[in-house]
Image (spheres, rainbow, N blue to C red):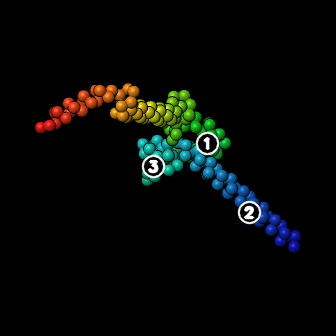
Amino acid sequence: MTRMRRRKTLLFFIASVCTLALGVSATAQDRAKQIGGKFMCMCSCNQVLTQCNHVGCTTSTAMLKELDQSLARGDSEDVITQAFVQEFGTKVYAEPPKSGLSLVAWVLPSVYLLGGTLLVVFIISRWRSRIHLETAAASGGPSGISAEELERARRRVARETED
């Protein structure tokens, strides 16, 4: 009976270790996919590293291997990022960092949208005020034509259209 218990305990221990190891490796794979998703494949395919679909792409394979080795060593995400930037330059980023000159690239679209919206609102308000002035002038308002000038113009039009 004790022998059977030892076997059960040993099997339980082995199963626990295997389950823990699989959980850790799955976590490492998820972390590798997460970090690899922040880089571009440098084979000129313009795809994210973890999604490069070129058959036999040696560049993505080498980059992913380097990423896995860095994670196995326990390197942080910042250390891995710096290593890739030193090796490939800033073009390795799938998304430019939000600092320095790249910050301008992030901010300018919003500035252009806001500026364009303000310009459209300004132009429309000018058009509306111009239309308002023209309708006031046509109705003989204070800035319009006097009654005498209007009558003179009507007589002239009547004479010229008698033909």
Vertical position of residue 14 compared to residue 153: above or below: below
Q: Earlier in the sequence, mark 1 or mark 2?
A: 2
SS at mark 3? loop
- For the residues labelled 1 and 2, the Cα–Cα distance comes to 28 Å
Answer yes or no: is residue 85 visible.
no
Q: Residue furthest bottom?
A: 1
Task: Identify residue for label 3.
Answer: 57
Looking at the image, is 38 positioned above or below residue 137?
A: below
**Mark seen at residue 70:** 1
Q: Are marks 1 and 3 in contact (CB under 8 Å)?
A: no
Quadrant of the image containing the N terminus: bottom right
> Is there CB contact under 8 Å for labels 2 and 3?
no
Q: Quadrant of residue 74?
A: top right
Give the residue displayed 52% in from the left and 49% down from the top.
50
User: Is residue 148 left or right of 27 when viewed as pictured?
Assistant: left
Q: Amino acid at mark 2?
A: Ala
